Amino acid sequence: MSVQTWTWILVGVTFALYFGIAIWARAGSTKDFYVAGGGVSPLANGMATAADWMSAASFISMAGIISFAGYDGSVYLMGWTGGYVLLALLLAPYLRKFGKFTVPDFIGDRYYSNSARTVAVICALIVSFTYVAGQMRGVGIVFSQFLQVDITLGVIIGMAVVLVFAFLGGMKGITYTQVAQYCVLIFAFMVPAIFISIQMTGNIIPQVGMGGTLEDGTYLLDKLDTLHTELGFKEYTQGSKSTWDVFAITFALMVGTAGLPHVIVRFFTVPKVKDARKSAGLALLFIAILYITAPAVAVFSRTNLIETVRDQSYTDIPEWFKNWEDTGLIAWSDKNGDGKIQYVQGSALVGKKPEFLEGRGVYGERLISNASDATNELYVDRDIMVLANPEIAGLPNWVIALVAAGGLAAALSTAAGLLLVISTSISHDLIKKQLKPNISDKGELRWARASILVAIVIAGLFGIYPPGFVAAVVALAFGLAAASFFPAIILGIFDKRMNKQGAVAGMVVGITLMLGYMIVYKTGLIGIMDPLPPSDWWFGTSPEGFGTIAMCVNVVVSLVVSRMTPKPPKDVTDMVENIRIPSGAGEAAQH
């Protein structure tokens, strides 16, 4: 069967499974809708948390990031997995014992302030919309390439699917759907990795294959280093970032991960405090399966791509190359007129990305930069590395289709979790807690579902009409969470003297500082100025790592302001003391 037929079959079966779970797990109360009734097992919650976290970015882009960054890409592996250690040790048990539905709910009650709650809601909305826009765009790309439908139609289909299990089941439906989605995405990621590892090195374990030898006895990593140096790139296994920047990025990703609202809310769905700790550990294990495999996938895909396209005549290029040109994820311009693809160090693009350009050249190539001072003729988007990897390696059609189903599962699972954060922020933290405190349970549930409906429409519009800075602000989500939520939560748990004035001041300063730095050094002032160069970075800190500095500033401001203003009320300090006492943890399950 063709790739398209296999894709329709696998996507149809998995979608039918998701719909069935959504109908079975229909939410009947706000507790079901917000925290799945608080009765999810640690195993199921661990798998759901893993699926919630491993978005289209992890499934589609993780190996792509590493394949281009090489050794420097290790910061993403360390940061994103290390964040779960912080969750398991410093946040999950205490937040679960506090017994609230959302992060803004914790911040609002801990700091006895609707102002703090409102700031937290704004942070949650910014982070969540940033993420969900990327997920919907990823859904559109997968549908467009593998099912041969327009990207816009693909986004609309994705919106409809998410709407069903998020609207009907809330967190209850999303949780059990995410368990199924985790199984789909991890199987889809591992199968081609195992196939290609056997194909290239004879090792069934991809991690071993990455360090193995090829048929000619050459080590695979040595071969990739040689290919890189021949094309003018730095050696794949050689790092170029400063030690400080590596630390800053890793730490920002760690504390950003631990502060992401759609991940934290998962620990409110289990019955007991100890279950929150167990599910955090299990989530780390389930996530590690993909994350320790991603470097191997990066090495395999990078090697195969280079050997397939360099100095290859366009007329003889494999069919997968021409198919992927239509998505804009790969593009070629014959600058020297020899009809061959020249792939060397250097930018192939000037101005907009190829998906926004019209027209084709003599060989059918998508028109990109024709600058005479640039010799590189090939544009390769990092997102192609996982999606096209099975095609580049010549794997069976069902494996190619399986990757499509896995990419959709990753994108939809995270989109659902993010949409629920948006919904609860509006219906619970704004409507219930501030505007209509006497609203009935059914009324609040109606507001929650209405919020999800509006959020899906907005997310779909971002997916169909992505702003030019979406790729840049993905990193902002981590920096924003690190600079705002993480200090407020940690200090709220471990510092009884922390008050509302300190928390609000710290969050506002942290958000403002991080947002300003990202705009100036990552996105620029759109239409007014370009991003400032790395030579102007503060203390040599990249925008991806600046969350570490913004977080430290937040902590300092919070502590100083809190010491200069009145102490928190006694009932608040007693509440903090109770959160930190392990004994009595069982009673928290009753809240």
Image (spheres, helix red, strand yellow):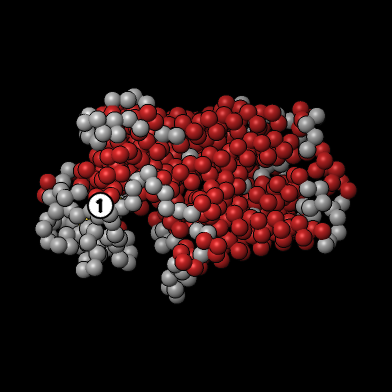
Q: Which image quadrant: the N terminus?
A: top left
Q: Position of residue 81 (x, y in %)?
A: 53, 39
Q: Position of residue 381 (x, y in %)?
A: 33, 52
Q: Position of residue 11 (x, y in %)?
A: 36, 35
- At mark 1, the secondary structure is loop
Q: Depth check: 141 or 431 in front?
A: 141
Q: Residue at x 68, y 51 (%)?
A: 487
Q: Residue at x 45, y 75 (%)?
A: 528
Residue ID for mark 1: 231
Q: Is residue 586 above or below residue 302?
A: above
Residue farthest bottom in this picture: 528
Q: Is residue 412 visible?
A: no
Q: Quadrant of residue 369?
A: bottom left
The reply, left or right, for residue 290 in relation to residue 262 is left
The reply, left or right, for residue 368 in relation to residue 116 is left
Q: Which image quadrant: the C terminus?
A: top right
Q: Depth check: 559 or 286 in front?
A: 559
Amino acid type assigned to the residue bearing label 1 in the image = Leu
Q: Is residue 325 above or below residue 31?
A: below
Q: How many C-alpha atoms fall within 10 Å of the one at disc 1: few (<14), some, or many (≥20)?
A: some
Q: Residue at x 37, y 26 (%)?
A: 205
Q: Depth check: 186 or 589 in front?
A: 186
Q: Quadrant of residue 147?
A: top left
Q: Depth check: 416 or 369 in front?
A: 369
